[in-house]
Image: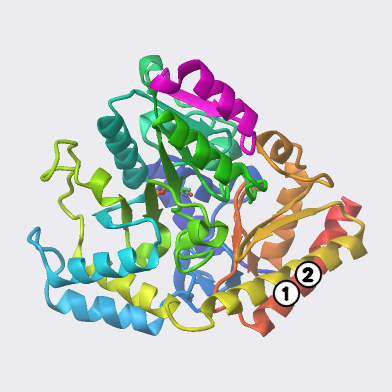
Amino acid sequence: MERKHTLSQELFRRAEQVLPGGVNSPVRSGRSVGVTPFFVKSAAGCRLEDEDGNVYIDYVGSWGPLIAGHAHPEVVEAVRQAATRGTSYGIPCRLEVEMAEKVVSMVPSMDMVRMVNSGTEATMSAIRLARGYTGRPKLIKFDGCYHGHSDCLLVKGGSGLLTLGIPGSPGVPDEIVSHTVSLPYNDLDAVETAFRKMGDQIACVIVEPVAGNMGTVPPAPGFLEGLRRLCDTHGALLIFDEVITGFRLAPGGAQQRFGVLPDLTCLGKIIGGGLPVGAYGGRRKIMEHIAPTGNVYQAGTLSGNPLAMAAGLAMLNILSRPGVYETLEERAAYLEAGLARAAEEAGVPVTLNRVGSMGCAFFNGEPVRDFQSALQSNTEAYGIYFREMLARGVYLAPSQFECFFVGLAHDREALDETIAAAGEALQVVKNA
Ligand code: PMP
């Protein structure tokens, strides 16, 4: 069925006049997959409806937060109730304590947490804390990992930079990134060499424990354990950026799933239930260096916002129920198997990387274990696949270098519809 996009196109024309590129975050523009964005009118469960009345099964889920589906009744009700009591106080409230207690009870390495308003703030603040705590300037990150858009982390970042082919960013002075060392993901030897050369200068290693911003790239066996050992040997802090993986891969995130505990953890996305929230936390001894107990400064007018705390708590309560992670695993495995079958039947080389409910179909017949191998993907083929899936009512990330996210609202019917659409879309890719 031909889909009309008249109203979305009209809104996009208006948006382009007043928003750079017509969007408030770059990858949404759809440039790399050759589309203009559709504009959402409403969303429920695993489905989105656009302004023209087209419906899509959504595998982006607002880039990860909506693991329980759009407009989950418990989240909506929690926000509604909170809003009737006021939208922000700037004074402590009960929900902040309940939220902190809940987070600390779920994430194994966290004794204390500080709430912020985005993943970017969480990583930026965790890095400042690591530098303040150790008194050292340098940080190690990994090529293709994205940790938000703060200056020192915009080096070989994945996500939108990778999608749009931007190597770094003008506006970030060289002196600031001179303390950032970016190394190949999954290459422990490179980390060892860096520590040998400048170990006493390195404040921290920050890593996505499963990389989710160059597609999905799992840690090689021993990689996370090796980072833990090297940080301990050299007195550096290990920071897990669990903005994507937190509450997605297990109740306690990737650290629980892989059994490696970081010193600091950054959280975002799911922790806000779809409202703008981030958090960072870790061992008490380190966290007490933050103002007002310590002198590492970090603050926020809206931090601990009652609506965000209410939404996040409702979300974490949903995820604390028995069987949730088994359901996610089972559904994502079903989708993965269906996609693999469809690719094989179409004769299109696709590498499927999946960890729990996050995954990526790389248009690349070879294993993808780092940034370099992710880059070997055929992004034109992904673009065709994206457009063909969209035409069949399935919304995937508008970039080869992002994840698909499966959630609790993706029922068997939606998964089967997706697999059938993929079968047809991959035939088109094959014949292109
Ligand atoms: N860290 C990771 C791993 C992320 O994926 C993201 C966003 N995609 C961020 C940090 C930044 O979060 P935000 O967009 O909320 O600032």
Res 337 label: 2
> Residue 94, which numbered label?
none
Q: How many marks?
A: 2
Q: Which of these two is toward me, 155 or 347?
A: 155
* Label 1 Cα crowd, 10 Å radius (few <14 / some 14-19 / many 20+): some
Q: In the rendered image, is residue 34 in sight?
A: no
> Quick check: 132 left or right of 333?
left
Seen as rendered, the residue at the extreme front is 233
**Residue 232 or residue 102, whichever sits in front:** 232
Residue 356 horizontal/vertical position (percent): 61, 65
Amino acid type, label 2: Ala
Name which residue lies at 70% across and 40% down: 374
Residue drawn at point x = 9 percent, y = 58 percent:
90
Task: Report whether the residue tagged 1 is closer than 8 Å to ligand 1.
Answer: no
Q: Residues within 10 Å of mark 2 (few under 14, many from 20)?
A: some
Q: Quadrant of the N terminus?
A: bottom right
Answer with the quarter of the image where residue 72 lies: bottom left
Give, as a single range, the part of the protein colored magenta.
Answer: 178-200
Q: Amino acid at mark 1?
A: Tyr
Depth check: 393 or 326 in front? 326
Q: Is residue 263 left or right of residue 229?
A: left
**Picture layout, residue 321 above or below residue 138:** below
Q: Position of residue 302 (x, y in %)?
A: 18, 55
Residue at 56% over, 29% down: 191
Residue found 27% across the figure and 55% down from its top: 113
Query: For numbered disc 2, what is the local secondary structure?
Result: helix
Image spot of residue 278 (x, y percent)? 33, 54
Q: Are marks 1 and 2 in contact (CB under 8 Å)?
A: yes
142 relative position to 378: left or right: left
Question: Which residue in the structure is indicated by mark 1?
Answer: 334
